Amino acid sequence: MESTLKKAKVPYRSDIITAATDKKLSSGKRISNIILGFFMLGIGLYGLYGALYGLVALFTTPFKLVMGVLLIFAIVVMLLLGAFCIYAAFRSFSPKSEWFIILYQDKILYKYRQDQSYREVVIEINDLCKCMVMHKIWMSKLLKGRNATQYDISVHLEYMENEEKQVISLEQMDGYHELNRLIRYLTADKDIPFFYVEIDKGYNEKPDDLEVLKDAEETDFLGGLKRYQKVSSIHYHR
């Protein structure tokens, strides 16, 4: 929890119960980002090496005018490619989270990224109406004529603001432990109603969350989000 609070730039307090995000500082989800980062770093360093080699050749080897111009152009391209790849590598090593949710004893702080900056929403627990879990299944088209059945579990919190219902959607969560604790606290300790909906209607594209949530039914929380994950995230069809 402390690492998530640090990444969210939220000071630790004794009344914080849990904190969750879609990208932790250390998790299995980051392995692909790290691999991509090293790949881009290698390309970037190779590009810078090529540009440096070209500069040395430019000042030490006689060239005709046309070849000299082409070499200068190649050096510029290699410099730009190297700089871009190194920048992309460091972005992959430290990816930005799309959202944070911090649960206090009497409120929730929700931070989400918009326009390259984070915005905050503070919700009093007394203003919460529902805690919902959604399990969606839909079809998506891939290359070479293959289809993919995609599965997605997400958590949604409905609350009242200025006498209107609003919904916070937590998707692509990085681990279930923190959100399990959040749901258990809200449903067991604060008596917030729990709703669940499972949609499997062969959608040709990802269905809209708010439309799907209308079919949610009140039930008891099973104690862990993993119990709702009946299948893997993606299954391919020829």
Image (cartoon, helix red, strand yellow):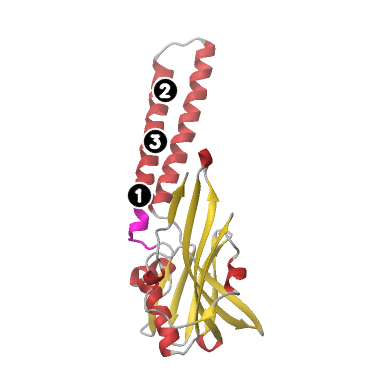
Determine contact: label 1, label 3, CB under 8 Å. Answer: no
The residue that disc 3 covers is: 43
Answer above or below: position of 213 versus 192. Answer: above
Answer above or below: position of 106 versus 88. Answer: below
Label 3 and label 2: CA atoms lie apart by: 16 Å
> Which range of residues does the magenta coloring cover?
24-34
Q: Which residue is drawn at 44% across and 45% down?
A: 87
Task: Find numbered disc 3 in the image and state the secondary structure of the residue it sits on.
Answer: helix
Q: Position of residue 217 (x, y in %)?
A: 53, 79
Q: Check disc 1 and give the amino acid type.
A: Ile
The numbered mark at residue 22 is none
Mark 1 crowd level (few <14, some 14–19, many ≥20, 10 Å Cα): some
Q: Check disc 3 and give the amino acid type.
A: Ile
The residue that disc 2 covers is: 54
Q: Quadrant of the N terminus?
A: bottom left
Q: Was residue 89 drawn as part of the magenta stretch in this picture? A: no
Q: Was residue 29 drawn as part of the magenta stretch in this picture? A: yes
